[in-house]
Every structure is written in structure tokens, then in C-alpha cells.
Image: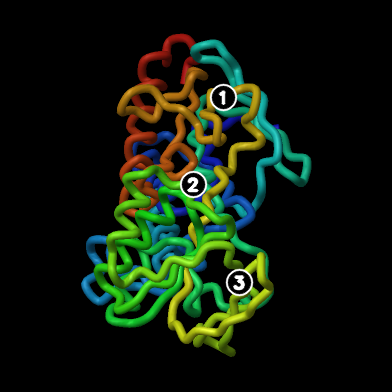
């Protein structure tokens, strides 16, 4: 059993940025990376929209650099997965976290940056081509398909918004909706229907993503008529939602109906004193590396102020 000043659960832009700021503030952060060290960016081939990389950078390299910077200031990065927490409701209380190997940790404060996991269809060909033309973020990766034909799967507001975004930069967007109607708001449906280069297909599902190393096409079928059709595309975007990685916090931290952690106002403060949330685990609107990093900074600053305010109680 260890007593830590600051425990960071999860890595990625939010976790590593929190670690950098926390370490520089002498909060002695210890980070547990989680099951996917570096987060979703480790499955992204090119990152072109993060400031400071004029030539772009691949996601795994970027996360290695983030980690090295955090470690340079004294962050202890541990490979491991926290599978249980027991949070104290008292200001200045000790929070308990349990690692999958049985290690018990006690922490003065916790910064949560466990992120959210994009939902995929589960097709073997889809999973094989992730990073080779299959993406779950049109805003992140759409630029690489400028002037090309792409497809997007989904029928909600996010899918509609990303389809119209792609339509501005791609020559054609085929939008596949599993049902005979869209779940998106009427305003978003009108936007899709009024965009000339969006080919909207209802009752349509993907049978297979075509291509060996990169996406070359799509075989889809009508789930009413079973009619199959193949189209040539270079990019496939999955927009069927995200699942925040918050299961271990259920019943202790306030969440919305989708499981995203609720923070107070413009801060990263949760309903539990000394527990802060940053990145995609509390942000379902933007979900960008740069915004995640920003909230990681905020979480470290919030943690520093918290520990300063209760130092007489906890004698740190």
C-alpha cells in the first residue's frame, strides 16, 4: 500500500499534460497508463492539427514525446490498469485505488483522464484497416482525404455533422444509415439532405471494408432487400458514438446519462473533493487532442489549489 500525493488515472494528451503541470508544481504525480497507453492517438497515423508540429506527427510518436516531457519533470509513469476505486467524500480525505495486480494505492488527490472509446462496427476488415483509412474522427483525419470519395456510418447528430464537414473537403460522401430514418435532429437532417455531394443510403449496412493495407472500397448491403453493392472509397469514418471509460466510477462520481463525468462550471472539479476529471472522459462535444491537453492543464491547476487549501488538514 502506497500513499501518493497525486494519482493520475489514464494517459493520453489530458493525462500527460496534467502530469507535466502537476510535476512542475511538486505534486509528485504517479500515472497509471491504463489498457491503451497514450489513448486514442496511438491508433492515429497522422496528427496535423496540434500546434507546434508544422510538418505533422504520427500519434504514437506524439504520445511518446508527451510521456518523455512528463517524466523529465519527475512524473512516475507506470504501466497498469486501475480496476477499482473507493473515493472519500471528505475534504482532505484519502482516496483508495486498486491496480489489477492487487496493489492498493492511497492518494491525496486523483486526476481522471481515462478518456472515451470510439464505438466500432466490429468487422474484422474494419479493425484491420484502422489507421489505414478507417477512422472514428472526421475532424481529426478528414483533411487527408481532400478531394477524394469517402463514406461515413451513422445516423445521429454527430454523423450528420461529420458528413457535412467531410462534404466540404471531399468530392463525395456516401452516408450509410442502418435504419429507414436518421436519429439526427431535423435541422441536421435538412443540412445533410441539402448537401449535393452527400449520397444518403437508408437501411444500409457494411458487409466488408475492401483493401489490403489501406481502404480501397466498401461492400455494403441493403438490410431489407439484401441487395449488395460495392463502391470505391479511400476513407471510412465510423460515427456511431463513443463510450466514456467511467465504469469504475459509477455510484461515486456524478455522470450524465451517457456516462460522461460531470464537472463544475468551467473547472475540472467533480462532486468528490480532491477528484478531478480531464479530457474526453468529461468532454463529449469537442474530443480533440488539443482540448484534452487544455483540460489536463486545468486539472493539475485545480489539484494544486485544492492541496494548497487543505494542507493544514492533510499535513502534506
The secondary element bearing badge 1 is classed as loop
* Distance of label 3 from label 2 (alpha carbons): 19 Å
Q: Which residue is mark 2?
A: 183
- Camera-nearest label, 2 or 1: 2
- Camera-nearest label, 1 or 3: 3
Q: Nearer the viewer, residue 206 or 251?
A: 206
The secondary element bearing badge 3 is classed as strand
Q: Is residue 11 visible?
A: yes
The residue sitting at 43% across, 56% down in the picture is 159
Q: Is residue 51 left or right of residue 10?
A: left
* Distance of label 1 from label 3 (alpha carbons): 37 Å
Q: Which residue is mark 1?
A: 253
**Residues packed near mark 1 inside 10 Å, few (<14), some (14 to 19) or many (20 plus):** some
Q: Which residue is mark 3?
A: 206
Residue 134 marker: none
- Camera-nearest label, 3 or 2: 2
Q: Position of residue 202 (x, y in %)?
A: 52, 62
**Residues packed near mark 3 inside 10 Å, few (<14), some (14 to 19) or many (20 plus):** many
The secondary element bearing badge 2 is classed as loop
The residue sitting at 46% across, 24% down in the picture is 270
Amino acid at each position: 500500500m502506497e500513499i501518493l500525493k497525486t494519482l493520475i488515472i489514464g494517459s493520453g494528451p489530458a493525462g500527460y499534460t496534467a502530469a507535466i503541470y502537476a510535476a512542475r508544481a511538486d505534486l509528485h504525480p504517479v500515472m497509471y497508463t491504463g489498457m491503451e497507453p497514450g489513448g486514442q492517438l496511438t491508433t492515429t497515423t497522422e496528427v496535423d492539427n496540434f500546434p507546434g508540429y508544422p510538418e505533422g506527427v504520427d500519434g504514437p510518436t506524439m504520445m511518446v514525446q508527451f510521456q518523455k516531457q512528463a517524466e523529465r519533470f519527475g512524473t512516475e509513469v507506470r504501466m497498469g490498469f486501475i480496476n477499482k476505486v473507493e473515493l472519500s467524500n471528505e475534504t482532505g480525505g484519502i482516496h483508495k485505488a486498486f491496480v489489477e495486480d492487487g496493489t492498493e494505492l492511497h492518494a491525496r488527490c486523483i486526476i481522471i483522464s481515462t478518456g472515451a472509446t470510439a464505438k466500432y462496427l466490429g468487422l474484422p476488415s474494419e479493425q484491420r484497416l484502422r489507421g489505414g483509412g478507417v477512422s472514428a474522427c472526421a475532424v481529426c483525419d478528414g483533411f487527408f482525404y481532400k478531394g477524394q470519395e469517402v463514406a461515413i456510418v451513422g445516423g445521429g447528430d454527430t454523423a450528420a455533422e461529420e458528413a457535412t464537414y467531410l462534404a466540404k473537403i471531399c468530392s463525395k460522401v456516401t452516408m450509410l444509415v442502418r435504419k429507414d430514418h436518421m436519429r439526427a435532429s431535423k435541422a441536421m437532417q435538412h443540412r445533410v439532405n441539402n448537401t449535393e455531394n452527400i449520397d444518403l443510403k437508408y437501411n444500409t449496412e457494411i458487409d466488408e471494408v475492401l483493401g489490403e493495407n489501406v481502404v480501397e472500397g466498401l461492400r455494403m448491403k441493403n438490410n431489407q432487400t439484401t441487395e449488395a453493392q460495392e463502391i470505391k472509397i479511400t476513407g471510412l469514418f465510423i460515427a456511431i458514438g463513443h463510450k466514456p471509460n467511467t465504469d469504475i466510477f459509477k455510484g461515486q462520481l456524478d455522470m450524465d446519462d451517457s456516462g460522461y463525468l460531470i464537472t463544475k462550471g468551467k473547472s475540472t472539479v467533480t462532486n468528490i473533493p480532491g477528484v478531478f476529471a480531464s479530457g474526453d472522459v468529461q468532454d463529449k462535444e469537442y474530443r480533440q487532442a488539443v482540448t484534452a491537453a487544455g483540460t489536463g492543464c486545468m486539472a493539475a491547476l485545480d489539484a494544486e489549489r485544492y492541496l494548497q487549501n487543505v494542507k493544514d488538514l492533510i499535513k502534506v
